[in-house]
Amino acid sequence: MNLRLIQFCKVLAMFVSLLFFSGCSVQGKKIYQTEQGALVGYDPVAYFLENKAVPGKAQFQTVRSNATWYFSSAKNQQLFAQTPEEYLPEYGGYCAYAMSYGLVVSSDPKAFTIIDNKLYLNYSLAVREKWLKGSEKFILQADTKWQSKLSSASK
């Protein structure tokens, strides 16, 4: 295959992906929810206290924002109950890098970053690496796109 054909195929694949993902929309109030609970069952407080993704336990759970949140300890559950806004992931828990392009894409709870005391998730560890190279710019873009998604979902 010649180089132009390979490049064309890559561009075509990216275009098709963008079309597919741009059709996604924020699904009302269940923006944090998955079948395994919010953050796929990981403890939102542990990201801040331990700087790592820690699985939550069924005995420490609470419902907030129409999502079930799991915690690794009663202490973390209590901290969340006192000030949940401090621990909620940005962009409903969707991939922050994709949101900077206006796309709603799921995230991997292990591909996270905390910037200015905010939790950002990415689709994968590889995407997280891209995100880190321009996170300030991506956050500005994603903030705008997320507000637009929320506005269009409430109509």
Image: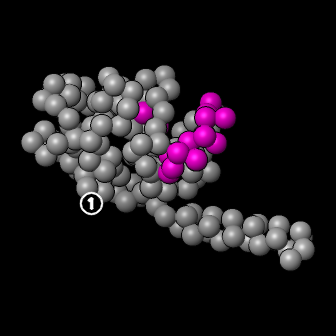
Q: Is residue 126 left or right of residue 120?
A: right
User: Which residue type does callout 1 highlight?
Assistant: Glu
Quadrant position of residue 11: bottom right
In the depicted view, which residue is nearer to us: 140 or 41? 41
Q: Residues within 10 Å of mark 1 (few under 14, many from 20)?
A: few
Looking at the image, which residue is at 82% across and 71% down?
Answer: 6
First to last magenta residue range? 119-136
Q: Residue at x 20, y 24 (%)?
A: 79
The residue lying at 38 percent from left, 32 percent from top is 52
**Residue 89 placed where, x, y %?**
39, 38
What residue is rendered at 44% in x and 55% in y? 106
Question: Residue 66: x and y, percent?
Answer: 23, 50
| Residue 81 appears in the figure | no
- Name the colouring of the figure: one colour
The answer to which of 109 and 26 lies nearer the viewer is: 109
Q: Residue placed farthest to the left in the image?
A: 59
| Whether residue 70 is visible | yes
Q: Quadrant for residue 78, please give it.
A: top left
Relative image position of residue 135 (x, y in whole percent): 61, 34
Q: Nearer the viewer, residue 116 or 123?
A: 123
For numbered disc 1, what is the local secondary structure?
loop
- In the picture, the quarter occupied by the N terminus is bottom right
Q: Is residue 57 magenta?
A: no
Quadrant of the image containing the C terminus = bottom left
**Residue 57 vertical position relative to residue 29 in the rendered view, above or below:** above
Q: Classify residue 4 as left or right of residue 113.
A: right
**To which residue does mark 1 refer?**
35
Determine whether 76 is above or below 138 in the image: above
